[in-house]
Amino acid sequence: MSRPIDLMRPNVLAQPAYSVADARGMIKLDAMENPYPWPGMLQQQWLNSLGNLELNRYPDPSAQDLVQLLRETHGIPGDAGCILGNGSDELIQMLIMAVGGSSRPIVAPLPSFVMYEVLARTLGAEFIGVPLQDDFALDMPALERVLLERRPALLFLAHPNNPTGLCYPESEVMRLIKLNPGVTVIDEAYAPFTDRSFLPLVGGYPNLMVMRTLSKLGLAGLRLGYLAATREWTDALERLRLPYNINTLTQHSARFALEHRAALEDQARTIRCERDRLTEALGRLPVVARVFPSEANFLLFRVKDGQADELFYGLRERGVLIKNVSRQGGLLADCLRVTVGSPEENTAFLDALGSLEPIP
Ligand SMILES: *Cc1c(COP(=O)(O)O)cnc(C)c1O
């Protein structure tokens, strides 16, 4: 009899499965989801529009109408190519599958979005994490050294970064793009919550890719991400995209949402206002040592030494689920991450955290 341990690749066996906390019945502030449903009228219109879909047929393999609409609404440069993924997670996987077989490593600053490292490891590519500085700024000398000495295939820069919420100075990112002999992928998952973007530059720099997702805007359940890059790169990546990776319901619903995007954009604006309120209120709580300024829909905050677990579980007992990033250790020791929710959810979170006593 063959068991997984006999047949599966050791690097896959070494990787724990991605685990998601059970959030039933909780105020869910752990995964950067948009807290708002669609306005009732829109919900009904969407439901009515589903009746015409032919689920017995395969979807449009290249989702042409959706790509065209994304180009128009998101300002993807005309000379750039665009490839869709089942969430940007799938695009990260595609990119690493495409180049990870080369002897050149995958590089990202740490801490950052965990999937870069997880997918590099499961796909058998070498991953190099370059630690950020104490204040989560880029360590430019260390990064420049890795780019020149190790010539990575891919450099992933989440911008704003997850889990810190910070953007980097534009001059530093530009310097890395120009210096990197491999491809620089700017992951703009939090674009709806910042005014900064490198998307207009795609096409102008042969090694620059920009990745976005509709997840954080309010469509996490649809699973849709896109990657903008030179046409040479997107044509090459088409070779390993699964033919029908964007299903019919997603293609249709994403188009519907983009045609009615004012509602989602309103929600993003409200979330930005709530982020500012939450930043200020958190900073006034005695258990909080520091709140990092965020350009995303979440906040990273540091608590007093050794109290992160206690506070995380205390919140959970009070029905509020956030993310305990302190467990990742290193620069994230004593840090917690909270998603910006609705005003009511944020107030409930602040009240719960305020009711927890700092340990003397
Ligand atoms: C959430 C997140 C993603 C994943 O997006 P999906 O499209 O839902 O797969 C990618 N990158 C960063 C930095 C994220 O925080």
Image (tube, rainbow, N blue to C red):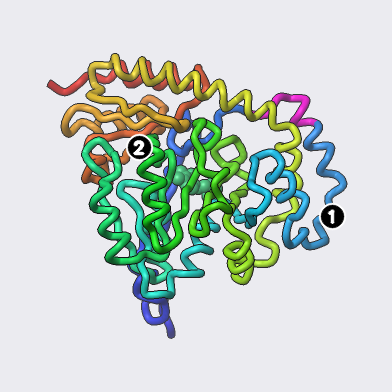
**Badge 2 amino acid:** Thr
Q: Residues within 10 Å of mark 2 (few under 14, many from 20)?
A: many
- Is residue 327 at all visible to an observer of this figure? yes
**Badge 1 amino acid:** Glu
- Residue that label 2 marks: 164
Q: Residue at x 78, y 25 (%)?
A: 41
Eyeballing the image, is 212 above or below 56?
Answer: above
Nearer-the-camera pick, 218 or 137: 137
Classify mark 1: helix, strand or loop: loop
Q: Residue at x 70, y 49 (%)?
A: 250
41 part of magenta stretch: yes
Q: Position of residue 197 (x, y in %)?
A: 51, 39
116 part of magenta stretch: no
Relative to residue 139, is residue 228 drawn left or right? right
Quadrant of the frame with the C terminus: top left
Q: Which residues are magenta?
A: 37-44
- Residue that label 1 marks: 54
Nearer-the-camera pick, 318 or 87: 87
